[in-house]
Image: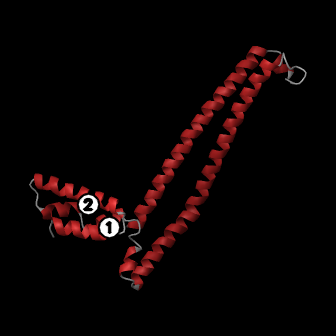
């Protein structure tokens, strides 16, 4: 097999991908050949280093386990495709969905707590500022009202802590999002194999 045959076979195996993505992948492998030829390697040596077009296509085509059924609908291919899909779906449903929903629930609870702490801090600070004006309508416990500066600092501290807590939760949500995307890509790699 030479460079042209390799690229033609790879293009054929990647036919299910969007045209732009397929062209980008083929361009990358053409560059591998160009660099290899500059280093004095032969087409055969470059192909051995890259691997077979079939193994490369498995890495890029998420439906590779199912696609052989479309080409050759033998009982073996159908059973393999069904088994791969069911096992991965069952695993995700049983072992991943529950913990994922639990983590999302905890994250929502943390956001609620951070918002609550922030509102409590703002309320304490506003209550101390407005107490002299609206003392008939605002009821502040004697322990807080007796030491106004300390209570004011408590309100400011709670507000600051609540805002920092919210920022921390945003980072946790971002990490959860990134982790979820990585896990989904991992699933696609499993299906490709």
Disc 2: which residue: 26
Q: Position of residue 54 (x, y in %)?
A: 29, 69
Q: Residues within 10 Å of mark 2 (few under 14, many from 20)?
A: some
Q: CA distance from mark 2 to mark 1?
A: 9 Å
Q: Residue furthest right?
A: 136
Q: Is residue 31 above or below residue 66?
A: above
- Labels 2 & 1 near each other (Cβ < 8 A): yes
Quadrant of residue 125 in the image?
Answer: top right
Image point 30% across, 67% down: which residue? 55
Q: Nearer the viewer, residue 142 or 26?
A: 26
Which quadrant holds the C terminus? bottom left
Image location of residue 63, percent across then percent down:
41, 69
Q: Is residue 87 above or below residue 117?
A: below
> What residue is disc 1 on?
14
Left or right: 128, with 77 as reference point: right
Q: Secondary structure at mark 1?
A: loop
């Amino acid at each position: 097999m030479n460079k042209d045959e390799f690229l033609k076979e790879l293009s054929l195996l990647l036919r299910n991908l969007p045209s732009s993505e397929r062209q980008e992948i083929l361009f990358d492998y053409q560059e591998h050949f160009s660099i290899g030829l500059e280093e004095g390697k032969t087409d055969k040596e470059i192909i051995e280093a890259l691997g077979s077009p079939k193994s490369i296509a498995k890495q890029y085509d998420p439906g590779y386990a199912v696609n052989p059924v479309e080409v050759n609908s033998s009982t073996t291919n159908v059973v393999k495709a069904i088994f791969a899909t069911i096992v991965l779906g069952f695993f995700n449903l049983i072992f991943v969905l529950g913990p994922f929903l639990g983590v999302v629930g905890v994250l929502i609870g943390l956001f609620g707590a951070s918002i609550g702490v922030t509102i409590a801090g703002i309320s304490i600070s506003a209550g101390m500022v407005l107490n002299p004006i609206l003392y008939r309508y605002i009821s502040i416990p004697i322990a807080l009202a007796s030491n106004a500066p300390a209570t004011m600092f408590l309100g400011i501290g709670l507000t600051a802590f609540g805002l920092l807590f919210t920022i921390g939760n945003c980072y946790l949500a971002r990490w959860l999002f990134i982790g979820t995307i990585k896990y989904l890509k991992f699933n696609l790699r499993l299906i490709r194999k």
